[in-house]
Image: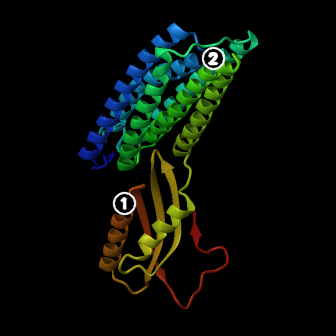
Amino acid sequence: MQMIRDHQPDPEKISAYKTALIITLAGNILLAVGKGLATYFTGSAALYADTANSISDVIYSFAMVFGIWLSLQPPDISHPQGHERFEPLVGLVVSLMMTIAGYEALRTSIDRFITGGEAIQLNLPTIILLISAALKGVMFYLITKLARRTNSPSLRATAKDHLSDVLTSLAAFIGILGSNFLHPLLDPAAGFLVSLWIFKAAFDAGKENISYLTGAGASETLRQRIINTANNVEGVQKVHHMMSDYVGPKLIVDMHINLPGDASLEEVHAVEDRVVAALEDIDEVDRAYVHVEPLEESNPPMEGEKEKFV
């Protein structure tokens, strides 16, 4: 018989996700429309690049809605451990859309540079870039707070995208200023810088989410915190083996602990339960499996049986 994990999504986490999705979707649609109009009136390559990025933001926002909704579904017979592992896929979608926007920005900037560029007049539509930077700054702040509350890789990727948008909008605005007052080629040059920022943010987000999907291990700092948590549980004599790997956005921990060889079965079971509970209270840990072995003080570990923490 297949066992289904008794685990329901945290209502507070669901509320945080809904807030993040509303902020991201509404903000990205507003910015895409505003920048699209500004691009139509100015013809700026830098502004076109920023508009392409905002359009990709709208597309991934809809992907986020579906992906996060799916990740929040409770365990069922098809996914007895839950659906949280779908969330890094959402982060990869964000990375992919950012990469496509970066390519479009780079292509347009190169074309405009080859043709010699043109001076872009500083008028009302270009002010939208400053408004965009300010709005994206607010979105970055709010989504970062929600990402910390939920420990969500997809929301962290989204926050990075918002921060990148702040910087790229400012770069596009500076490019327009430069083309108007210094040299027309400064506009496509700024568009080129916009594409580099997009590629950098896409790489960082993709790298993090790929690590969650390929079984990467915990950082050294987190490994040590997990070991210390187990060592501080009453009754634990020693932790001599710990292995952790990401399965989705959270860790699975496999740990071996030592207890006195004369401990009763009831004592061993009680200590094991306390260790599992303590480990699963760590935000980054999804599940913990604990194996208990006797501690024989008079028999030190043989060669090849040394402590292993990975």
From this view, report whether residue 258 is shown above or below residue 131.
Answer: below
Q: Residue at x 30, y 36 (%)?
A: 19
Q: Please tell me the numbered disc located at residue 73.
A: none
Residue 76 horizontal/vertical position (percent): 30, 39
Earlier in the chain: of badge 1 and badge 2, it is 2
Q: Depth check: 203 or 111 in front?
A: 111
Q: Residue at x 50, y 30 (%)?
A: 94
From this view, report whether residue 76 is shown above or below residue 61.
Answer: below
Location of the C terminus (image quadrant): bottom right
Is the residue marked by circle 2 packed among few (<14), some (14-19), or many (20+) residues within 10 Å?
A: some
Q: Please tell me the numbered disc located at residue 180.
A: 2
Q: Residue at x 50, y 29 (%)?
A: 93
Q: Please tell me the numbered disc located at residue 280.
A: 1
> What secondary structure is found at the residue carrying circle 1?
helix
Residue 249 horizontal/vertical position (percent): 45, 46
Residue 84 horizontal/vertical position (percent): 39, 42
Which picture quadrant has residue 275? Answer: bottom left
User: Would residue 92 be visible to someone looking at this image?
Assistant: no
Q: Residue at x 61, y 74 (%)?
A: 305
Left or right, 224 with reference to 82:
right
Q: Three-letter amino acid code at disc 2?
A: Asn
From this view, report whether residue 84 is shown above or below residue 105.
Answer: below
Q: Depth check: 274 or 98 in front?
A: 98
Q: Three-letter amino acid code at disc 1?
A: Glu
Quick one: which residue is furthest to the front in this view?
A: 181
Left or right, 157 with reference to 304:
left
Left or right, 227 with reference to 234:
right
CB-based contact (under 8 Å), mark 1 and mark 2:
no
Quick one: which residue is furthest to the bottom in this view?
A: 298
